Image (tube, helix red, strand yellow):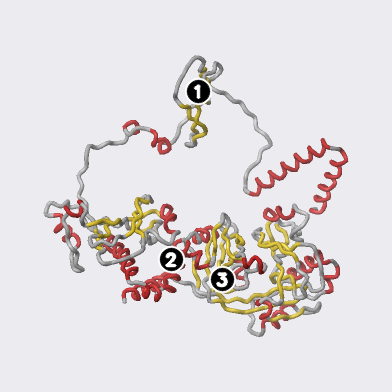
């Protein structure tokens, strides 16, 4: 049926060419509409053929009238469409729709007076201000103190001066900032030092600022130095006197968070020796903390049992391009087949499919991915093949077995892997058949004479594995420290960029980067380090990762807290 539909399109084009320019223009318009319809359906957008309009306007003629006022056209959604002056024309008028319109109160509040909108105004206020203060005398740090409100507003960014009267001050109650407002600050390396996820959709916040004991406020205030055994509220009444408000209290959580900030300042003042001793621990803790912040699971390592079906290309020539396309519709690479005796095409051991909606962009072309056969169930057969070299580290170190026509596939697989092979490791005959089709389309019938090779390798990687939704992984990578640690050079709208390890020697010298797409935002993906991948850090859909690899031990909250505590003890010592 698909072949017939393509044949029909070809015949229509030939017919249009015979009929002349008028028919060609009509066919071109139809093709453009079909393209728009396909794209709209892809994103779930409804399409209607036309619409009927009955437009009515209320019009005020402006002939003979003058004004300096500006006419602003604002939608009920608060969007400013235009700003216009009223011209001195006899035919000028103001027009509006025949129904009353309204705009929500928050959208218009910033252009109206307080009383008009029911805002209460008070003549004065009485204040009983209490501050928790950490003296910084004798301490040095390069950290920047950011003063952020619970509403997510950055009030100030300050360095800590080398003054004996310098201190950090905050309010006596614990503060929190909603997670949506905190994200812009959580994704950075520096800045606000205390933003701990409370687990309830909020983040703990210390609204600290730098002050000087010589300032008027602190010079005139009452002070009380806290001891470990002090009762907080009794100490507060010592500072305020007997006339203190009964509601005035000090939250112990506010003191705890202030101590965390001050500990960071103290750690930075210890010098390079302490920093060097904990550098590795700190880097790991940054990755763990950032991953947990975005709901991403972290694993210590992974075990890999990778199997590849390989078609040797020695002695064969083709002008076709090999496109490596994932089942998620992502184009990973476009490569030519080089004239090398060690060149080959490799694919995974299981059959793959791609949804028809994602395959349409590739099916509508003359060249590219050569195996995309409609399965009739809304999916298209796919061969995720790429060009490899038997001299590459992966293939040089792997176990190989050449397939014969009468070989039992699973027995051949166990020969390649050995007796310790996982019981779940199997080879799908459909994957072999699709690879044969690809080779025949690329090199012709002579490809049938070549024998396929099973290549297998078992290894363990000590690198971290991060598992989560693609959207959360993208948020995770907004941190400069995370990107630096993972060898990622930048972020894109669909993923990230990293150095291309498979580029030619010339491009390697020029540090060429390639884009890695994360896939659909809601899809679960695994991000990990692989020396044999195109980039230092690579990404796979979780289902595909788990078909060839086994995750190591998950890093729990307790493990992360233990790591942080160890770093704290080292710095304290």
Residue at left offset 56%, top offset 56%: 492
Callout 3: few (<14), some (14-19), or many (20+) C-alpha neighbours within 10 Å?
many
The residue beneath circle 1 is 86
- Relative image position of residue 31 (x, y in whole percent): 75, 43
Contact between marks 2 and 1 (CB within 8 A): the answer is no
Q: Earlier in the sequence, mark 1 or mark 3?
A: 1
As drawn, the residue found furthest toward the top would be 64
Q: Which residue is mark 3?
A: 529
For disc 2, the marked residue is 289
Looking at the picture, does residue 165 appear above or below residue 243? Answer: below
Q: For residue 271, which quarter of the picture? A: bottom left
Between disc 1 and disc 3, the foreground one is: 1
Q: Nearer the viewer, mark 2 or mark 3?
A: 3
Q: Is residue 489 left or right of residue 23?
A: left
Circle 1 residues within 10 Å: few <14, some 14–19, many ≥20: some
User: In front: 503, or 33?
Assistant: 503
Crowd class of label 2 (few under 14; some 14 to 19; many from 20; radius 10 Å): many
Q: Position of residue 256 (x, y in %)?
A: 29, 64
Place of residue 241 in the rendered image (x, y in percent of width and height, measured from the top left): 12, 55
Secondary element at tag 2: helix
Q: Tell me: 539 left or right of 476.
A: right
């Amino acid at each position: 049926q698909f072949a017939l539909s393509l044949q029909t399109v070809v015949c229509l084009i030939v017919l249009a060419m015979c009929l002349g320019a008028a028919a060609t223009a009509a066919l071109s318009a139809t093709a453009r509409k079909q393209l728009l319809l396909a794209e709209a359906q892809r994103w779930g957008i409804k399409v209607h053929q036309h619409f009927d309009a009955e437009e009515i306007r209320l019009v005020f003629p402006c002939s003979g009238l003058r004004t300096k006022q500006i006419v602003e056209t604002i939608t009920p959604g608060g969007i400013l469409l235009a700003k216009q002056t009223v011209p001195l024309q006899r035919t000028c008028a103001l027009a509006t729709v025949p129904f009353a319109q309204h705009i929500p109160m928050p959208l218009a509040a910033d252009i109206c007076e307080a009383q008009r909108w029911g805002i209460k105004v008070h003549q004065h206020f009485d204040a009983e201000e209490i501050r928790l203060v950490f003296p910084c005398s004798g301490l040095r740090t390069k950290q920047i103190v950011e003063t952020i409100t619970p509403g997510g507003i950055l009030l100030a960014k300050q360095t800590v001066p080398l003054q004996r009267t310098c201190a950090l001050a905050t309010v006596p109650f614990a503060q929190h900032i909603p997670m949506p407002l905190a994200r812009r600050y959580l994704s950075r390396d520096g800045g606000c030092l205390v933003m701990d996820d409370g687990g309830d959709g909020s983040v703990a916040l210390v609204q600290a600022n730098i002050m000087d004991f010589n300032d008027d406020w602190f010079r005139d205030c009452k002070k009380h130095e806290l001891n470990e055994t002090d009762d907080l509220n009794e100490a507060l009444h010592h500072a305020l006197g007997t006339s203190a408000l009964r509601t005035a209290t000090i939250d112990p959580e506010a003191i705890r968070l202030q101590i965390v900030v001050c500990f960071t300042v103290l750690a930075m003042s210890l010098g390079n020796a302490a920093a060097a001793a904990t550098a590795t621990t700190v880097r790991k803790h940054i990755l763990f903390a950032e991953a947990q912040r975005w709901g991403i699971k972290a694993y210590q390592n992974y075990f890999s049992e990778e199997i590849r079906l390989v078609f040797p290309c020695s002695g064969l020539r083709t002008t076709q391009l090999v496109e490596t396309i994932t089942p998620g519709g992502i184009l990973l690479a476009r490569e030519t087949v080089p004239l090398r005796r060690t060149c080959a095409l490799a694919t995974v051991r299981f059959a793959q499919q791609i949804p028809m909606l994602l395959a349409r962009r590739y099916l509508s072309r003359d060249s590219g991915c050569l195996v995309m056969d409609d399965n009739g169930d809304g999916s298209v057969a796919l061969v995720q093949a790429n060009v490899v070299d038997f001299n590459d580290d992966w293939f040089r170190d792997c176990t190989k077995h050449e397939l014969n026509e009468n070989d039992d596939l699973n027995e051949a697989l166990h020969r390649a892997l050995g007796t310790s092979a996982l019981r779940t490791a199997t080879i799908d005959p459909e994957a072999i058949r699709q690879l044969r089709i690809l080779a025949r389309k690329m090199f012709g019938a002579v490809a049938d004479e070549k024998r396929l090779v099973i290549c297998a390798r078992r290894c363990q990687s000590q690198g971290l594995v991060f598992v989560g939704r693609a959207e959360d992984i993208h948020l995770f990578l907004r941190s400069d420290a995370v990107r630096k640690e993972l060898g990622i050079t930048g972020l894109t709208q669909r993923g990230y960029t990293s150095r291309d390890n498979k580029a030619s020697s010339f491009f390697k010298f020029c540090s060429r980067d390639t884009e890695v797409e994360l896939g659909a935002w809601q899809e679960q993906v695994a991000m990990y380090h692989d020396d044999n991948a195109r980039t230092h850090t690579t990404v796979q859909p979780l289902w595909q990762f788990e078909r060839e690899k086994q995750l190591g031990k998950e890093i729990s909250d307790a493990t992360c807290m233990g790591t942080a505590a160890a770093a704290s003890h080292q710095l304290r010592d």
